[in-house]
Image (spheres, helix red, strand yellow):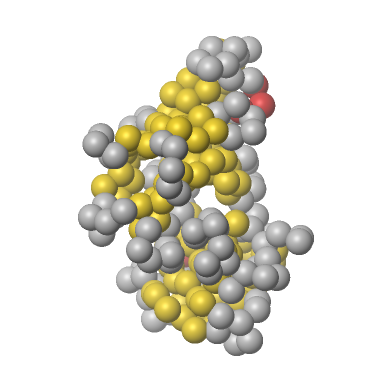
Amino acid sequence: DTGVSQNPRHKITKRGQNVTFRCDPISEHNRLYWYRQTLGQGPEFLTYFQNEAQLEKSRLLSDRFSAERPKGSFSTLEIQRTEQGDSAMYLCASSQQGGAKNIQYFGAGTRLSVL
Amino acid sequence: AQSVTQLDSQVPVFEEAPVELRCNYSSSVSVYLFWYVQYPNQGLQLLLKYLSGSTLVESINGFEAEFNKSQTSFHLRKPSVHISDTAEYFCAVSEGTNAGKSTFGDGTTLTVKP
């Protein structure tokens, strides 16, 4: 068990560019979550997957955001036409359905800076 | 809908003093409650959790929290803090009937001074 892995750790991009982040969950976990954390606030839920199915999406997830988990293992979060307001820490977490009741294990996050 | 309120954004204390970080939640259904700790430039680490059973839960590094259903609170306490406890602490709630998303408070910055 190597924990939840997120790449890259930091991403600096120019406004209008597209970016993609990757999350590798704990191997036996079938649920995967994406959160966004801005300075001085707690994480805000974006979306979550059970296996490859995307079961819930927050209203925070605008049309410029898309998440996939094609084979029920790793997940990607893509932001198109980035805006300065997208600058934040993007956190991924995973959990095991039927396990210890939704204990989510977090990765170290990807910090996005949009210039 | 569920929400979490952390009543103190910053808590400064001296080393070896006791500390309490306050958390109140609202939910229309049964909940699971969590405290996470976040060190600079790191992800969240689970500190302790209430799922069911005893309302007093403890962590391995001396923190404890008590679930109070009538007051909808889940305050975090430690009788004697160390410099290394300096971090951001987040309270979170997850609905017991839907093992999906968690809702987090805005965090409390605990600063332990020598």
Q: Is residue B72 above or below residue A50?
A: above
Q: Is residue B60 above or below residue A66?
A: above
The answer to which of B32 and B11 lies nearer the viewer is B32
What is the x, y in percent for residue A68? 55, 82
The answer to which of A115 and A23 lies nearer the viewer is A23
Position of the N terminus of chain B, as image quadrant, is bottom left
The answer to which of B112 and B77 lies nearer the viewer is B77
Residue at (56, 63) in percent of width and height? A99
Residue at (67, 70) in percent of width and height? A28
What is the x, y in percent for residue B6? 36, 37
What is the x, y in percent for residue B101? 42, 63
Q: Is residue B84 above or below residue A36?
A: above
Lateral position of residue A111 relative to residue B89, left or right = right
Residue B96 seen in the figure: yes
Residue at (53, 17) in percent of width and height? B79
Q: Residue furthest front?
A: B53
Residue at (64, 33) in percent of width and height? B60
Position of the C terminus of chain B, as image quadrant, is top right
Count of numbered circles on the image: 0
What is the x, y in percent for residue A73? 65, 78
The part of the image, by quadrant, that contains residue B2 is bottom left
Q: Residue furthest right?
A: A2
Residue A40 seen in the figure: no
